Image (tube, rainbow, N blue to C red):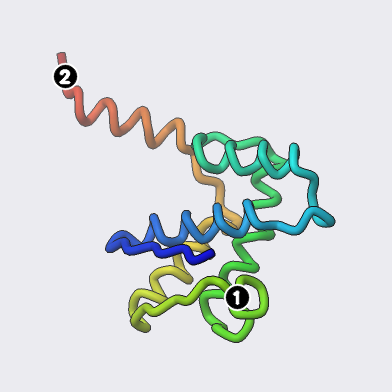
């Protein structure tokens, strides 16, 4: 199988890498039902359960290693080849580090502020 991601938006590339890594986890590490629930939760939701957030944090740390060390990437996901510039690779690294950051990110507050700005005063 060959997966090609041609995307100018690095956020989408990082998300696709995360989803690929989740989908192709070996059956010994997690069952099919658990893998499906986590995949669908990451794919479709902004609000995730604490167990999924913990999984995302662990996987994001692993993705940082993959992005910064191509030999490690080949060992973990040999079917992925990342031909990106250093600037894009640094951006991907910072983006994935944000996923496993310690600071709290309140998506509901961001959504509320965005709606209030878009709708304006009535």
Q: Which mark is residue 38?
A: none
Please tell me how crowded label 2 is: few (under 14), some (14-19), or many (20+) other residues with Cα within 10 Å: few
Q: Position of residue 69 (x, y in %)?
A: 56, 83
Residue with the most extreme top position: 122
Residue 47: image quadrant is top right
Secondary structure at badge 2 equals loop
Residue at point 48%, 71% (across, down) = 93
For the residue pair 41 and 20, the one nearer the viewer reads as: 20
Residue on which the image places disc 1:
78
For the residue pair 102 and 34, the one nearer the viewer reads as: 34
Residue 13: image quadrant is bottom left
Residue at point 51%, 61% (across, down) = 17
Please tell me how crowded label 1 is: few (under 14), some (14-19), or many (20+) other residues with Cα within 10 Å: few
Quadrant showing the C terminus: top left
Residue 25: image quadrant is bottom right
State the CA–CA distance, disc 1 to disc 2.
Answer: 53 Å
Secondary structure at badge 1 equals loop
Residue 8, above or below 56: below
Quadrant showing the N terminus: bottom right
Residue on which the image places disc 2:
121
Given contact means CB atoms under 8 Å apart, are the residues at marks 1 and 2 in contact? no
Q: Position of residue 84 (x, y in %)?
A: 37, 78
Residue at point 69%, 51% (across, down) = 55
Residue 105, above or below 9: above
């Amino acid at each position: 199988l060959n997966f090609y991601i041609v995307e100018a938006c690095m956020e989408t590339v990082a998300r696709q890498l995360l989803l690929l890594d989740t989908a192709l986890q070996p059956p010994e590490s997690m069952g099919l039902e658990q893998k499906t629930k986590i995949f669908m939760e990451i794919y479709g939701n902004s609000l995730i359960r604490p167990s999924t957030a913990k999984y995302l944090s662990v996987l994001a740390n692993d993705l940082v290693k993959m992005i910064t060390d191509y030999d490690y990437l080949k060992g973990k996901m040999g079917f992925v080849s990342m031909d990106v510039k250093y600037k894009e690779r640094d951006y991907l690294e910072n983006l994935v580090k944000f996923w496993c950051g310690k600071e709290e990110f309140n998506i509901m507050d961001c959504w509320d502020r965005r709606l209030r700005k878009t709708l304006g005063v009535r």
